[in-house]
Amino acid sequence: MKYHHVATSLLFSLAICLQAETPTATEKKIPTPDLCLDLGEQLKERITAEPERVLEFTSDAIKSNPACSCELTKAAILASNADRKTVAAIVEAAILAHAESYRIIAHCALAQAPDATSEIQALFNRMKLGNPLDFPGIGNVGPTPGGQGGNPLLPPLNPMSLPPKVIAPPPVTVVNP
């Protein structure tokens, strides 16, 4: 009986110690959407003041707040009025700052600048990250362009550019009255 009380008290004290070391949601500092939007606005102001340092500012902001990488990437693209190549450079800087968020960074960049799709896909191929438009965990979906079953490297021949085939009916010789 005595050992039962000792074991129970040890387990209870161990549980209290473990609970004290487990961080709560407020201690983990999970950013709220408002905080991420505020950080995005601050990044926009910094980029507007010094547009030539957009990559540096974006990288620093994502390193210090990786959970806000989506909003920070979109803010950098908006503030810099980025063309397609600059969007790819911003995505690369963001991925290098926090590589674990590469999918969310790419999706947010594509949402902000859909015309930069080919540049972002080329960046992913160069960085050997896969296609940002693939489903997570499945890998590449579909055939490779130029490969068996994929889109040909040369455009297909337009059938409308060929002269039409003329089908002539056979001559009529016998007519039943």
Image: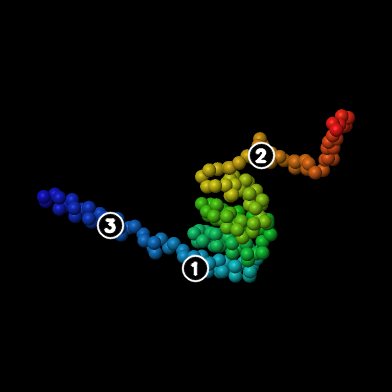
Q: Which mark is residue 17?
A: 3
- Quarter of the view holding residue 47: bottom right
* Helix, strand or loop status at disc 1: helix
Q: Is residue 93 visible?
A: no
Q: What type is the residue that disc 2 sits on?
A: Gly
Q: What type is the residue that disc 3 sits on?
A: Cys
The residue at which mark 1 appears reads as: 34
At 51% from the left and 61% from the top, the residue drawn is 68
Q: How many marks?
A: 3
Q: On the picture, is 148 further left or further right than 6?
A: right
- Quarter of the view holding residue 20: bottom left
Q: On the picture, is 32 further left or further right than 6?
A: right
Q: On the picture, is 154 further left or further right than 97?
A: right
At 63% from the left and 66% from the top, the residue drawn is 79
Q: Nearer the viewer, residue 139 or 4?
A: 139
The residue at which mark 2 appears reads as: 150
Q: Are marks 3 and 2 in contact (CB under 8 Å)?
A: no
Q: Nearer the viewer, mark 3 or mark 2?
A: 2
* Quarter of the rendering occupied by the C terminus: top right
Q: In the displayed structure, would residue 10 be above or below residue 29?
A: above
Q: Nearer the viewer, residue 121 or 56?
A: 121
**Mark 3 or 1 closer to N-term?**
3
Q: Nearer the viewer, mark 2 or mark 1?
A: 2
At 36% from the left and 61% from the top, the residue drawn is 24
Q: Nearer the viewer, mark 3 or mark 1?
A: 1
At 53% from the left and 59% from the top, the residue drawn is 69
